[in-house]
Image (spheres, rainbow, N blue to C red):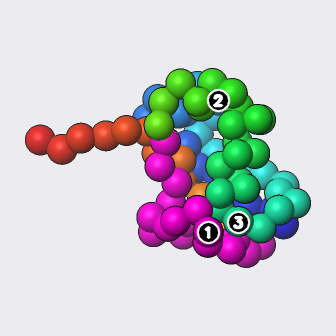
């Protein structure tokens, strides 16, 4: 399946891009998280949150073709 990945904050700097099209052969968000750590080991330096189609989801979510995945660094309000 094809996914659209959007990186925010310091994740943009770590992968040298703010948006990528990503071909993915597995189905769950947890699998994607593991795949991203293999493809971009620098992401393991920080604890990222993943959102699917603008919603935070758990790792068991089954992804669909053309889902939009946001990779978000730690953030705080104030």
Mark seen at residue 15: 2
Q: Residue at x 76, y 35 (%)?
A: 38
Residue 70 position, x and y percent, is 54, 54
- Mark 2 secondary-structure assignment: helix
Disc 2 and disc 1: Cα gap in Å? 25 Å
User: Where is the N terminus found, in terms of image quarters?
Assistant: bottom right
- Provide the major secondary structure of the magenta segment: loop
Mark 1 or mark 2, which is nearer the start of the sequence?
2
Q: Residue at x 47, y 37 (%)?
A: 47
Comparing 19 with 39, the one in front is 39
User: Which residue is disc 3 drawn over?
Assistant: 28
Q: Please report contact status of discs 1 and 3: CB closer than 8 Å, yes or no.
A: yes
- Mark 3 secondary-structure assignment: loop
Q: Which of the 4 quarters of the picture holds residue 14?
A: top right
Task: Answer yes or no: is residue 17 visible.
Answer: yes
Residue 37 position, x and y percent, is 69, 37
Q: Which residues are magenta?
A: 48-66
């Amino acid at each position: 399946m094809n996914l659209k990945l959007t990186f925010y904050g310091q994740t943009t700097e770590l992968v040298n891009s703010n948006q990528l099209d990503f071909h993915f052969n597995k189905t769950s968000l947890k699998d994607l998280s593991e795949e991203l750590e293999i493809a971009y080991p620098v992401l393991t330096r920080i604890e990222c949150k993943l959102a699917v189609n603008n919603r935070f989801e758990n790792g068991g979510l089954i992804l669909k073709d053309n889902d939009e995945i946001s990779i978000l660094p730690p953030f705080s309000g104030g």
